[in-house]
Image (spheres, helix red, strand yellow):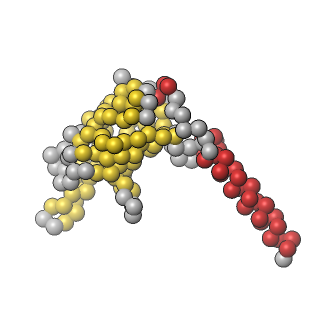
Amino acid sequence: MKKIVVPILRITAVTFIIFMLNACGTNELPAKLSGTYSGKADLILRSSKAGKLVFVEDSVFVNITISNTLISGNVGNANFEACTIRNNRGWLSRKLNLKTDFLIKGKLSGIIYDKDSTSGKVISIPFNLTEEGIEGSVFLASDEEKIPIISFLKLKKQ
C-alpha cells in the first residue's frame, strides 16, 4: 500500500507546484496592449416576452479602450463601468493552450440595444492579443453561470 501512496503524493505535489508557479506570473500588461479596439459583433441576449424567455439577436458596435489597467468603451449603447483587466494565464497555460491571455471583468451600464430588457450587466471578456487586434468572447457573469452573449469577438486596433 505504501509503495502506491508515495508516488501518488509526489505526483500530486509536483502538479500543485507547477500550477502554482504558472499562477504566479507577472500581472504587468504589455505596452502593445494599450490602445483602442473596435468592430461589429453579433450579439444574442435572453429577453422576457409575454412571460417567456426568448433569444434576441442583433449586431452591435463594440469599442474597447485600454490604457494601462483602465478600461473604457461600450458594447452597443451600454458603457463599461468599473472594469479591470489582468493577465489570465502564465507560461504553462500558454504552452498547453488553456485559457486566454487577458481577462476584462466589470459591468455594463445601460441597455445594449433597444430590445434589451435589463441594464447593469456584470460581464467577463476573456481575449487574446493578435497581430490585428483582439479576439475573444463576451459573457454575462453571475455566481451561478456564465452566459455567452458575443461568442466571437474580433476587434481591430485603431
- Residue 46 visible in image: yes
Q: Quadrant of residue 103?
A: top left
Above or below, comparing residue 91 to residue 13 in the picture: above
**Residue 147 position in % (x across, y down):** 36, 55
Closer-to-camera residue (30/155): 30
Q: Quadrant of residue 84?
A: top left
Q: In the figure, is residue 74 to the left or right of 12? A: left
- Residue 96 visible in image: no
Q: Residue furthest bottom?
A: 1
Above or below, comparing residue 113 to residue 62 in the picture: below
Closer-to-camera residue (33/155): 33
**Residue 146 position in % (x across, y down):** 39, 56
Q: Quadrant of residue 38?
A: top left
Above or below, comparing residue 102 to residue 156 in the picture: below
Above or below, comparing residue 8 to residue 101 in the picture: below
What residue lies at 79% left-to-right and 61% top-to-bottom? 10
What residue lies at 36% left-to-right and 42% top-to-bottom? 83
**Residue 104 position in % (x across, y down):** 41, 42
Q: Residue furthest left?
A: 50
Closer-to-camera residue (25/128): 25
What residue lies at 25% left-to-right and 50% top-to-bottom? 120
| The C terminus lies in quadrant | top left
What residue lies at 65% left-to-right and 51% top-to-bottom? 19
**Residue 5 position in % (x across, y down):** 80, 70
| The N terminus lies in quadrant | bottom right
Q: In the figure, is residue 60 to the left or right of 16? A: left
Q: Residue furthest right?
A: 3
Q: In the figure, is residue 144 to the left or right of 56? A: right
Closer-to-camera residue (137/120): 120
